[in-house]
Amino acid sequence: MLFPKKRNNQYKKIISFLLVLAILLAAAKFTAGRQDITLPEEILQVIAAPVQGAFQYVTRSVQDFVSGLKSYRQLLQENKELRKQLAENATLKVRLTELRKENMRLRKMLELQDALSYEMIAAEVIARDPDSWFNMVTINKGKKDSVEPNMAVITTEGLIGYVYSVSYTTANVLLLTDSRPGVSALVQRSREPGVVGVVEYAPDKPGYLQMRGLPRDANILAGDTIITSGLGGIFPKGLVIGHVLETGVDELGLTRYAFLQPAANFNRLEEVFVIKSNSVSSGSEAVYPGGEE
Amino acid sequence: MTARTAAIIFLLFLASLAIQGSVLALAAPGGVHPDILLVVTVALSALAGPRRGAITGLCAGLMQDILFGSPLGFFAVVKMLAGAAAGLFAEYIYKDVVLVLMLMMGVLTFFSDAATFLMLDAFGFSRPPSLVGYLQQATFIRAAINFFLMGAIYPYLYRAQKRHLLFTNYPRTEE
């Protein structure tokens, strides 16, 4: 025997291993460009196919689930962003509308300021008396802006009241719809001397005004415009107060009265003008832009 | 090797190849796929010894060649070498220390990829431009994944071997 039995066995193993290796390498070399498959390969592939298919199915399901989850998350994120954008757009739209309205109001005010010969202080209404007992609003101009008590306050539509009290930065304006102020007024159309009444709040018709103390035979008709007379020292002459809705004679039959629709909308006060008292000269009269005054 | 062992190993390989081609295709960090068939081969070979390990690797590689259309014998050579090496190394380590097996798996991944590279080169197939570059980029990641896969798979196979469900008459696993 050339080698001992144990060593011989080892050599056999090594030679077998190398032989198999060589066969495999040769097989790989010869089958590299091969397209046909043998029967055993086909059988193995047929056996493996369902298993591979099953795993593939599981994989696809997992993939679909994961991609579905991703899509769902993406959609959620997208939805969230779109909602945010929508909300921003809606806010912008509201802001734009507000700015447009403000622009229109400011233009009107500018026209009014140009048209009226008084020196005026533009102000914004920043608060309104929350209870219904007093018709008072707060504006954002006060002593530092030279606002003083008893100055007339108007909007682009007409008179709304006068300054009741003043702080350093704000002022309270008593509206005509309150029971306290009374404005000396006349009928713009007739301008009859002596036909002067007092406009005050109408207790029977909230939100409306009442003109009383007119002569029984006063020339006043429904639709007439009522303006300030300039008497009393607070309100300059010619400020529009309102329009006559109906007229009548009082219970005693001595004087005539009229219910007025206020020219200004008291429910929507935003920008107002305070007419500086020292700018009002006697005999000067307000002329509203586009009005017939 | 009994018929039952052969059937179990065949099913293991089949499942590994199916998983390799489907589920693990999803897990490809840096575009590198783990080689679960190699992991199973090495794990089985470590339990089987060098001779059976070589046969196990040969069978695994042949199955891979047949099912995935590579030249018949190509991966059979690579896996056989890996199986033989695993079986040989395993004779000198404690088989119940998983971490050592995991480390061996990492090393054998480099060995397997290097062998594959050389085979590709020898057969004139397209291959990565540099062996060192390939080992540094792709194999490093694959070795890391295979390392953890070995840690997950080997304990089950070890337990199966302890219950004599796999190889028989191999004294090293009886310790």
Image (tube, rainbow, N blue to C red):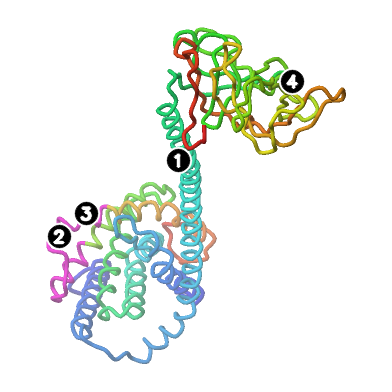
Mark 3, residue position: B137
Mark 2, residue position: B131
Tell me the subunit letter for badge 3.
Answer: B
Tell whether position B119 is magenta.
yes
Q: Secondary structure at mark 2?
A: helix
Q: Quadrant of residue B75?
A: bottom left
Q: Secondary structure at mark 4?
A: strand
Give the answer, above or below, for where A165 lies relative to A215. Answer: above
Disc sitting over residue A213 in the figure: 4
Image coords of residue A18 (percent x, y): 21, 74
Q: Secondary structure at mark 1?
A: helix
Tell me the subunit letter for badge 1.
Answer: A
Mark 1, residue position: A100
Q: Secondary structure at mark 3?
A: helix
Tell me the subunit letter for badge 2.
Answer: B
What amino acid is labelled 1 in the image? Answer: Arg
Which mark's residue is nearer the viewer, 1 or 3?
1
Image coords of residue A54 (percent x, y): 50, 74
State which region is magenta: B114-140
CA gap between label 3 and label 2 equals 10 Å
Image coords of residue B104 (percent x, y): 31, 53
For the residues beneath circles 3 and 2, the answer to whether they share a chain is yes
